[in-house]
Amino acid sequence: MIYLLETELKDTKPLFISLNSIFGVGRYYSLIFCKKLGISKNFKVSALTEKQKLNLTRLIENSNLFINSELKRFLIKKKKDLINIKSYKGLRKLKGFPVRGQRTRSNAKTAKKINIKI
């Protein structure tokens, strides 16, 4: 296991797949990071050298992406702002109802789990 940017990357998986486990890095950016480093997307994480790990860390940090705790903090702040300005979306989140117009009569169980009070 490699610990990179607050996330453990599994050794058995390809680099392209294991970069997706970093919160905020999706398939698109993991492919871009592999191309910029000159590494095949099927390259295993266990085969990375120390220099490649360092280059990968620098590349991700220098890209202007919110990742891990920064992104989580941003999303929570965004939800709190919606509640503070009393928008429709914010009030629905506050009450625990679906936000995007779904019905509440029979299928609102998931929304009640997700839209907990902040």
Image: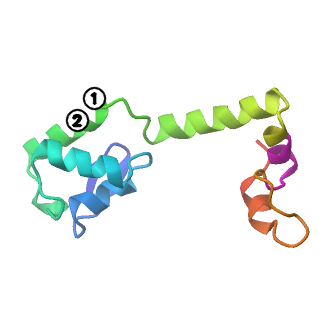
- Three-letter code for the amino acid on which mark 1 is drawn: Asn
**Residue 36 as seen in the image, left or right of residue 94:** left
Q: Residue at x 25, y 58 (%)?
A: 16
**Residue 55: % across, % down:** 15, 38
- Three-letter code for the amino acid on which mark 2 is drawn: Leu
Residue 59 visible (yes or no): yes
Q: Residue at x 22, y 70 (%)?
A: 12
**Rendered-image quadrant of the C terminus:** top right
**Magenta span of residues:** 91-98
Q: Nearer the viewer, residue 21 or 2?
A: 21
Picture quarter containing residue 112? bottom right
Q: Residue at x 28, y 64 (%)?
A: 10
C-alpha distance separating marks 1 and 2: 5 Å
**Tag shown at residue 62:** 1
Magenta stretch secondary structure, dominant: helix
Q: Residue furthest bottom?
A: 106
Do the residues bearing badges 1 and 2 touch, measured as CB atoms within 8 Å? yes
Q: Label 2 crowding class (10 Å Cα cut-off): few <14, some 14-19, many 20+?
A: some
**Tag shown at residue 59:** 2
Residue 1 visible (yes or no): no
In this rendering, is residue 61 above or below 92? above
